Image (tube, rainbow, N blue to C red):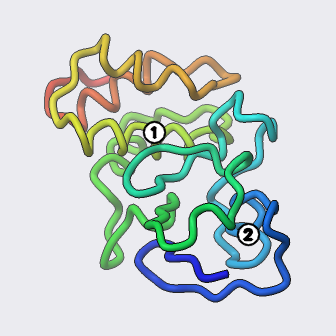
Amino acid sequence: MRLTVNGRDHEVTLVRDDTPLLWVLRDHLGLVGTKFGCGIAQCGACTVHIDGEPAFACVTQASTVEGRKITTIEGLASDGSLNPLQQVWIDQDVAQCGYCQTGQIMRAAALLGRNASPTEDQVDEAMAPNLCRCGTYNRIRSAVMSAAGGGREA
């Protein structure tokens, strides 16, 4: 199968059609920023973008995304510089254990891609599908609002 990930075309062989995108990204392409959390689309640790929209890579069959634009956390940075959202995440020390944070950042980036100035309620609604076992929701909201230019420092 042929996949476009982070702006690059990849030919992936020896993969069954029903293989989840998560495992193709991690095991075949070496993009390990996308994390396995639950495997049933309940936690969001595996969130990637497919054509700019957040998607759970753990339940998305890789064969269904041929010809579509896939972006992982590794694809947010460009020219050796972090995406502004990634930088805010660091500056505000959002992560606690950090395991879910790549999925959180990907969901936040999708939100800001379609709404550059969300309200706190819109941030909460957009981020709801992603869980944080450490409970850093207030810091996540603050970072998204700061990246949008309307937030407060945590």
Residue at the spot 49% in from the left edge and 64% down from the top edge: 70
What's under tag 1, amino acid-wise? Arg
- Along the line of sight, which residue is nearer the eye, 136 or 67? 67
Q: Position of residue 32 (x, y in %)?
A: 68, 64
- Along the line of sight, which residue is nearer the eye, 112 or 33? 112
Cα distance between the residues tagged 2 and 1: 20 Å
Say which quadrant the C terminus sits in.
Answer: top left
Name the residue carrying label 2: 24
Q: Position of residue 129 (x, y in %)?
A: 56, 25
Q: Which mark is residue 107?
A: 1
Image quadrant of residue 81? bottom left
What's under tag 2, amino acid-wise? Val
Q: Where 56 falls versus 135 (above or below)?
A: below
Residue at the spot 33% in from the left edge and 23% down from the top edge: 142
Tag 2 and tag 1, C-beta contact below 8 Å: no
Q: Residues within 10 Å of mark 2 (few under 14, many from 20)?
A: many
Say which quadrant the N terminus sits in.
Answer: bottom right
Q: Secondary structure at mark 2?
A: helix
Q: Is residue 136 left or right of residue 92?
A: right
Residue at the spot 81% in from the left edge and 41% down from the top edge: 39
Marked residue nearer the N-terminal end (2 or 1) = 2
Q: Residue furthest top?
A: 121
